[in-house]
Amino acid sequence: MATCPILRRAILPVLVLVPVLALLGAWLAETLADDGGARREIAGITYRVPAAFHVRPQEGNALFIQLSLPDWGPLDEDRPGWDDNVNILIEEGINSIPQLWDDLWSAVPGENIGGIRERVTRIYRIEPNLTVKEISLGRDIVIPDQDLTTFPIGIMRCWRPQPDLPNASCALLFDRDGQRWKVTFGRDRMRDFSIFKQQAAQTIDLFREK
């Protein structure tokens, strides 16, 4: 099945919400009926994803999709780096983000993370709205400013660039409708986490069965 030609020709900024969703929604309406794509039911919500999106196999009933940037359409080719793609993983929510915070990520400098050998080395701010817990083994826990009892925004786990890992990424984890979502994008776009979250939710909602 060919991907949406309108989307492929569109000249858009990396993150544009309404125009992209309007085009993608119109295309999906024409392709979902007898498409033969993937069907997933997660926490009582059913998704039907067209075959053009190449849903990746996962354990259980999780949904994993790689989408292209800037159009948030099907990804034709998985290339190294994060300049042209974003990953979305949706699965049953087991432990909530507040539970994970209490169990794993509430450590302070000098303490281990969740009893394992990764240690918090320092905490610093990225203004105007991010707190970073630097972890000893090349990762950071990045906390957007929010209520730290409910975590309505979520938490980011980010790799720091290394010689053997030049294409560092951030994964935004958040709870939604009884599900655990993980949206992964390039670390250089960390400040755009809220846009990625909104775009991912609105895009995947196009696949929800009514």
Image (cartoon, rainbow, N blue to C red):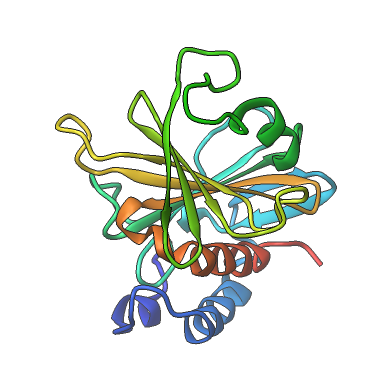
Which quarter of the image is occupied by the N terminus? bottom left
**Residue 203 position in % (x across, y down):** 58, 67
Q: Nearer the viewer, residue 209 or 146?
A: 146
Q: Is residue 41 left or right of residue 75?
A: right
Within the image, what quadrant is residue 58 found in?
top right
In the image, is residue 134 above or below residue 193?
Answer: above
- At a point 46% along the width and 68% down the height, the residue shown is 128
Which quarter of the image is occupied by the C terminus? bottom right
**Residue 39 position in % (x across, y down):** 68, 48
Q: Residue furthest left?
A: 163
- At a point 38% along the width and 82% down the height, the residue shown is 6
**Residue 134 position in % (x across, y down):** 40, 36
Q: Nearer the viewer, residue 97 or 21?
A: 97
Q: Nearer the viewer, residue 92 or 148?
A: 148
Q: Residue furthest right?
A: 44
Tag count in the figure? 0
Within the image, what quadrant is residue 41 found in?
top right
Q: Is residue 205 left or right of residue 133?
A: right
In the image, is residue 38 above or below residue 62?
Answer: below
Q: Nearer the viewer, residue 96 or 81?
A: 96
**Residue 67 position in % (x across, y down):** 43, 58
Q: Is residue 104 left or right of residue 157?
A: right
- At a point 73% along the width and 41% down the height, the residue shown is 98
In the image, is residue 187 above or below residue 98?
Answer: below
